[in-house]
Image: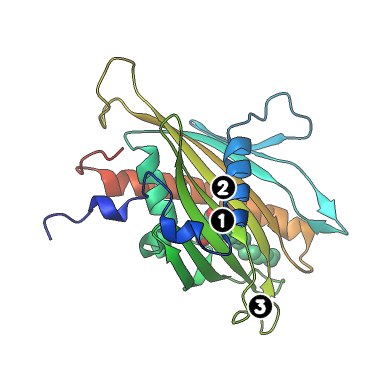
Amino acid sequence: AEHTRDEVELPPPAVDNRLTVHTLWPEIDRISTEQIQAAFEGVGGQIGWQLFAEEGDMRMYRREVEVDGMVMDPLKAMHKVRGVSAREMCHYFFNPRYRYEWETTLENMNIVEAISSDAIVFHQTFKRIWPASQRDALFWSHVRSAPQHTYAVTNHSTTNERYPANSGACIRLIVTVCLACRSEWPPGQQPSRDNITTSIAYCSTVNPGGWAPAGVLRAVYKREYPKFLKRFTSYVLEQCRDKPLLL
Ligand code: 6CM
Protein backbone atom coordinates (compact mmCIF):
# COMPACT_ATOMS: atom_id res chain seq x y z
CA ALA A 1 0.00 0.00 0.00
CA GLU A 2 3.10 2.19 0.27
CA HIS A 3 3.42 2.29 -3.48
CA THR A 4 0.07 3.38 -4.81
CA ARG A 5 1.44 4.08 -8.26
CA ASP A 6 3.55 1.31 -9.71
CA GLU A 7 5.45 1.82 -12.94
CA VAL A 8 3.34 -0.94 -14.51
CA GLU A 9 0.18 1.15 -14.16
CA LEU A 10 1.61 3.98 -16.22
CA PRO A 11 1.44 4.02 -20.00
CA PRO A 12 4.22 1.75 -21.23
CA PRO A 13 7.12 3.33 -23.17
CA ALA A 14 6.73 0.78 -25.98
CA VAL A 15 3.68 -0.74 -27.70
CA ASP A 16 2.28 -3.82 -25.89
CA ASN A 17 2.62 -7.04 -27.94
CA ARG A 18 -0.96 -8.04 -27.21
CA LEU A 19 -2.08 -4.97 -29.14
CA THR A 20 0.02 -5.55 -32.27
CA VAL A 21 -1.63 -8.96 -32.85
CA HIS A 22 -5.20 -7.60 -32.45
CA THR A 23 -7.43 -7.12 -35.52
CA LEU A 24 -7.85 -3.44 -34.62
CA TRP A 25 -4.10 -2.79 -34.55
CA PRO A 26 -3.62 -1.51 -38.16
CA GLU A 27 -6.45 1.01 -37.68
CA ILE A 28 -5.31 1.99 -34.17
CA ASP A 29 -1.74 2.51 -35.35
CA ARG A 30 -2.68 4.54 -38.43
CA ILE A 31 -5.22 6.82 -36.75
CA SER A 32 -3.06 7.39 -33.67
CA THR A 33 -0.07 8.36 -35.83
CA GLU A 34 -2.20 10.77 -37.87
CA GLN A 35 -3.86 12.31 -34.83
CA ILE A 36 -0.63 12.85 -32.88
CA GLN A 37 1.01 14.50 -35.88
CA ALA A 38 -1.98 16.77 -36.49
CA ALA A 39 -2.32 17.66 -32.81
CA PHE A 40 0.99 19.53 -32.74
CA GLU A 41 0.33 21.41 -35.96
CA GLY A 42 -0.62 24.97 -35.11
CA VAL A 43 -3.88 26.71 -35.85
CA GLY A 44 -2.19 30.06 -36.53
CA GLY A 45 -2.50 31.13 -40.12
CA GLN A 46 -4.94 28.34 -40.88
CA ILE A 47 -8.16 29.57 -42.34
CA GLY A 48 -11.36 28.99 -40.46
CA TRP A 49 -10.10 28.41 -36.92
CA GLN A 50 -11.78 30.75 -34.49
CA LEU A 51 -10.66 31.30 -30.92
CA PHE A 52 -13.67 30.80 -28.64
CA ALA A 53 -12.17 30.41 -25.18
CA GLU A 54 -9.03 31.74 -23.56
CA GLU A 55 -7.92 31.51 -19.95
CA GLY A 56 -4.34 31.70 -18.73
CA ASP A 57 -2.29 29.44 -21.01
CA MET A 58 -5.39 27.69 -22.40
CA ARG A 59 -6.66 28.52 -25.87
CA MET A 60 -9.56 26.81 -27.61
CA TYR A 61 -10.35 27.01 -31.30
CA ARG A 62 -13.14 25.60 -33.39
CA ARG A 63 -14.02 25.41 -37.02
CA GLU A 64 -17.71 25.62 -37.87
CA VAL A 65 -18.57 22.61 -40.01
CA GLU A 66 -22.10 21.40 -40.76
CA VAL A 67 -23.04 18.33 -42.77
CA ASP A 68 -26.75 18.13 -43.67
CA GLY A 69 -27.51 20.61 -40.89
CA MET A 70 -25.62 18.60 -38.25
CA VAL A 71 -22.85 20.28 -36.28
CA MET A 72 -19.47 18.52 -36.64
CA ASP A 73 -17.23 21.40 -35.57
CA PRO A 74 -13.63 20.25 -35.10
CA LEU A 75 -12.17 21.53 -31.86
CA LYS A 76 -8.55 22.16 -31.03
CA ALA A 77 -7.20 23.28 -27.68
CA MET A 78 -3.73 24.22 -26.50
CA HIS A 79 -2.67 24.40 -22.91
CA LYS A 80 0.48 24.44 -20.79
CA VAL A 81 0.79 22.86 -17.38
CA ARG A 82 3.70 23.15 -14.99
CA GLY A 83 4.73 20.40 -12.59
CA VAL A 84 3.38 17.27 -14.31
CA SER A 85 4.77 15.10 -17.10
CA ALA A 86 3.21 14.10 -20.40
CA ARG A 87 3.18 10.50 -19.23
CA GLU A 88 1.28 11.39 -16.07
CA MET A 89 -1.29 13.48 -17.98
CA CYS A 90 -1.95 10.58 -20.36
CA HIS A 91 -2.10 8.05 -17.54
CA TYR A 92 -5.01 9.88 -15.91
CA PHE A 93 -6.80 10.45 -19.23
CA PHE A 94 -6.47 6.83 -20.39
CA ASN A 95 -6.99 4.86 -17.17
CA PRO A 96 -10.71 4.13 -16.57
CA ARG A 97 -10.18 4.08 -12.81
CA TYR A 98 -10.12 7.87 -12.66
CA ARG A 99 -12.64 8.75 -15.36
CA TYR A 100 -15.69 9.47 -13.21
CA GLU A 101 -13.57 11.82 -11.12
CA TRP A 102 -12.89 14.31 -13.93
CA GLU A 103 -15.38 13.53 -16.76
CA THR A 104 -18.56 15.48 -15.97
CA THR A 105 -20.53 14.71 -19.17
CA LEU A 106 -20.30 10.97 -18.46
CA GLU A 107 -23.28 8.98 -17.20
CA ASN A 108 -21.93 5.44 -17.49
CA MET A 109 -18.72 3.74 -18.64
CA ASN A 110 -18.18 0.08 -19.51
CA ILE A 111 -15.04 -1.74 -20.56
CA VAL A 112 -16.00 -3.70 -23.67
CA GLU A 113 -12.56 -5.19 -24.26
CA ALA A 114 -9.29 -4.78 -22.37
CA ILE A 115 -6.98 -5.41 -25.32
CA SER A 116 -3.64 -4.69 -23.65
CA SER A 117 -1.99 -2.38 -21.13
CA ASP A 118 -2.19 0.41 -23.72
CA ALA A 119 -5.52 -0.23 -25.49
CA ILE A 120 -9.11 -0.58 -24.24
CA VAL A 121 -12.49 -0.55 -25.99
CA PHE A 122 -15.09 1.49 -24.08
CA HIS A 123 -18.84 1.93 -24.21
CA GLN A 124 -20.01 5.17 -22.63
CA THR A 125 -23.34 6.89 -22.18
CA PHE A 126 -23.43 10.63 -21.73
CA LYS A 127 -25.75 12.82 -19.72
CA ARG A 128 -28.80 13.76 -21.73
CA ILE A 129 -28.92 17.27 -23.09
CA TRP A 130 -32.40 18.67 -23.46
CA PRO A 131 -34.13 18.64 -25.96
CA ALA A 132 -31.97 16.07 -27.78
CA SER A 133 -31.96 12.29 -27.23
CA GLN A 134 -29.32 10.78 -25.00
CA ARG A 135 -26.06 9.82 -26.71
CA ASP A 136 -23.72 6.86 -26.32
CA ALA A 137 -20.34 6.06 -27.86
CA LEU A 138 -18.27 2.94 -28.51
CA PHE A 139 -14.61 3.65 -29.04
CA TRP A 140 -11.12 2.24 -28.73
CA SER A 141 -8.63 4.15 -26.66
CA HIS A 142 -4.88 3.85 -27.13
CA VAL A 143 -2.03 5.45 -25.22
CA ARG A 144 1.47 5.60 -26.64
CA SER A 145 4.77 7.36 -26.34
CA ALA A 146 6.41 9.30 -29.16
CA PRO A 147 9.76 11.03 -29.61
CA GLN A 148 10.60 14.27 -27.72
CA HIS A 149 9.12 13.27 -24.33
CA THR A 150 5.68 12.96 -25.88
CA TYR A 151 2.77 10.78 -24.80
CA ALA A 152 -0.67 10.75 -26.40
CA VAL A 153 -4.07 9.12 -26.00
CA THR A 154 -6.22 8.64 -29.09
CA ASN A 155 -9.91 7.69 -28.86
CA HIS A 156 -11.77 6.65 -32.00
CA SER A 157 -15.21 5.17 -32.61
CA THR A 158 -15.54 1.53 -33.54
CA THR A 159 -18.28 -1.13 -33.73
CA ASN A 160 -19.05 -4.28 -31.75
CA GLU A 161 -21.81 -6.84 -32.29
CA ARG A 162 -22.62 -6.90 -28.58
CA TYR A 163 -23.17 -3.12 -28.59
CA PRO A 164 -25.30 -2.32 -31.65
CA ALA A 165 -25.86 1.37 -32.41
CA ASN A 166 -29.26 3.06 -31.99
CA SER A 167 -30.89 -0.06 -30.51
CA GLY A 168 -32.10 1.45 -27.24
CA ALA A 169 -32.88 4.96 -26.09
CA CYS A 170 -29.49 6.29 -27.11
CA ILE A 171 -28.27 7.69 -30.40
CA ARG A 172 -24.71 6.57 -31.16
CA LEU A 173 -22.32 9.47 -31.62
CA ILE A 174 -19.07 9.15 -33.54
CA VAL A 175 -15.96 10.58 -31.97
CA THR A 176 -12.27 11.10 -32.68
CA VAL A 177 -10.28 12.59 -29.83
CA CYS A 178 -6.56 13.03 -29.28
CA LEU A 179 -4.84 14.29 -26.15
CA ALA A 180 -1.19 14.81 -27.05
CA CYS A 181 1.29 15.99 -24.40
CA ARG A 182 4.94 16.99 -24.67
CA SER A 183 7.24 17.72 -21.72
CA GLU A 184 10.13 20.16 -21.59
CA TRP A 185 12.58 21.31 -18.95
CA PRO A 186 15.57 23.68 -19.05
CA PRO A 187 18.54 22.22 -20.95
CA GLY A 188 21.28 20.86 -18.74
CA GLN A 189 18.97 20.41 -15.74
CA GLN A 190 17.43 17.28 -14.26
CA PRO A 191 13.65 17.25 -14.81
CA SER A 192 11.63 17.79 -11.62
CA ARG A 193 8.18 19.01 -10.55
CA ASP A 194 9.73 22.47 -10.17
CA ASN A 195 11.08 22.86 -13.70
CA ILE A 196 8.96 20.65 -15.97
CA THR A 197 6.39 22.13 -18.36
CA THR A 198 3.98 20.03 -20.39
CA SER A 199 2.33 21.37 -23.52
CA ILE A 200 -1.07 19.90 -24.23
CA ALA A 201 -2.82 19.69 -27.57
CA TYR A 202 -6.38 18.35 -27.40
CA CYS A 203 -8.33 17.71 -30.61
CA SER A 204 -11.89 16.51 -30.81
CA THR A 205 -14.38 15.91 -33.59
CA VAL A 206 -17.83 14.68 -32.61
CA ASN A 207 -20.52 13.68 -35.08
CA PRO A 208 -23.74 13.74 -33.01
CA GLY A 209 -25.05 10.81 -35.05
CA GLY A 210 -28.56 12.12 -35.43
CA TRP A 211 -30.59 15.25 -35.06
CA ALA A 212 -29.48 17.71 -32.40
CA PRO A 213 -30.23 21.44 -32.52
CA ALA A 214 -27.13 23.26 -33.78
CA GLY A 215 -27.46 26.20 -31.37
CA VAL A 216 -27.84 23.98 -28.33
CA LEU A 217 -24.96 21.76 -29.35
CA ARG A 218 -22.58 24.69 -29.95
CA ALA A 219 -23.59 26.25 -26.63
CA VAL A 220 -22.91 22.94 -24.86
CA TYR A 221 -19.48 22.58 -26.49
CA LYS A 222 -18.59 26.19 -25.69
CA ARG A 223 -19.36 25.59 -22.04
CA GLU A 224 -18.21 21.98 -21.62
CA TYR A 225 -14.84 21.79 -23.42
CA PRO A 226 -13.14 24.58 -21.42
CA LYS A 227 -14.69 23.14 -18.26
CA PHE A 228 -13.32 19.69 -19.13
CA LEU A 229 -9.77 20.82 -19.89
CA LYS A 230 -9.47 23.04 -16.81
CA ARG A 231 -10.97 20.40 -14.55
CA PHE A 232 -8.87 17.60 -16.01
CA THR A 233 -5.55 19.47 -15.75
CA SER A 234 -6.19 20.60 -12.19
CA TYR A 235 -7.25 17.04 -11.32
CA VAL A 236 -3.92 15.66 -12.59
CA LEU A 237 -1.96 18.37 -10.75
CA GLU A 238 -3.78 17.45 -7.55
CA GLN A 239 -3.19 13.70 -8.05
CA CYS A 240 0.53 14.17 -8.70
CA ARG A 241 1.21 16.54 -5.84
CA ASP A 242 3.77 15.05 -3.42
CA LYS A 243 4.33 12.01 -5.64
CA PRO A 244 7.62 11.43 -7.43
CA LEU A 245 7.71 12.75 -10.99
CA LEU A 246 7.38 9.92 -13.52
CA LEU A 247 8.72 10.49 -16.99
O1 6CM B 1 -12.29 13.58 -24.35
C1 6CM B 1 -13.04 13.57 -23.39
N1 6CM B 1 -13.41 12.44 -22.78
C2 6CM B 1 -12.98 11.13 -23.16
C3 6CM B 1 -13.32 10.15 -22.07
O2 6CM B 1 -14.66 10.12 -21.79
C4 6CM B 1 -13.53 10.67 -24.47
C5 6CM B 1 -14.89 11.12 -24.71
C6 6CM B 1 -15.41 11.27 -25.90
C7 6CM B 1 -16.81 11.65 -26.13
C8 6CM B 1 -16.99 13.09 -26.33
C9 6CM B 1 -18.44 13.38 -26.51
C10 6CM B 1 -18.77 14.67 -25.93
C11 6CM B 1 -20.21 14.95 -26.04
C12 6CM B 1 -20.78 15.19 -24.69
C13 6CM B 1 -22.11 15.83 -24.73
C14 6CM B 1 -23.20 14.84 -24.97
C15 6CM B 1 -23.66 14.92 -26.38
C16 6CM B 1 -25.07 15.27 -26.48
C17 6CM B 1 -25.42 15.65 -27.87
C18 6CM B 1 -26.85 16.02 -27.99
C19 6CM B 1 -27.15 17.47 -27.87
O3 6CM B 1 -12.65 11.09 -25.48
C20 6CM B 1 -13.59 14.88 -22.83
C21 6CM B 1 -14.83 15.24 -23.55
C22 6CM B 1 -15.34 16.57 -23.13
C23 6CM B 1 -16.62 16.89 -23.83
C24 6CM B 1 -17.12 18.24 -23.50
Which residue is drawn at the image coordinates 35% and 37% (left, top)?
A: 85
**Residue 138 seen in the figure:** yes
Residue 103: x and y in percent read 47, 59
* Mark 1 Cβ and ligand 1 under 8 Å apart: yes
| Labels 1 and 3: the sequence-earlier one | 1
Contact? badges 2 and 1 (CB < 8 Å): yes
In the drawing, does residue 117 fall left or right of residue 77?
Answer: left
Residue to which mark 1 is pinned: 155
The quarter of the picture where the N terminus appears is bottom left
Amino acid carrying label 3: it is Cys
Residue 121: x and y in percent read 52, 66
Which residue is drawn at the image coordinates 29% and 14% (left, top)?
A: 188
Amino acid carrying label 2: it is Cys
Which residue is drawn at the image coordinates 76% and 56% (left, top)?
A: 215
- For the residues marked 2 and 1, what is the alpha-carbon distance in whole angstroms? 6 Å
Q: Nearer the viewer, residue 154 or 128?
A: 154
* Callout 3: SS: loop
* Mark 2 Cβ and ligand 1 under 8 Å apart: no
Count of numbered circles on the image: 3
Residue 178, labelled with which disc? 2
Give the mark toward the camera: 3 or 2: 2
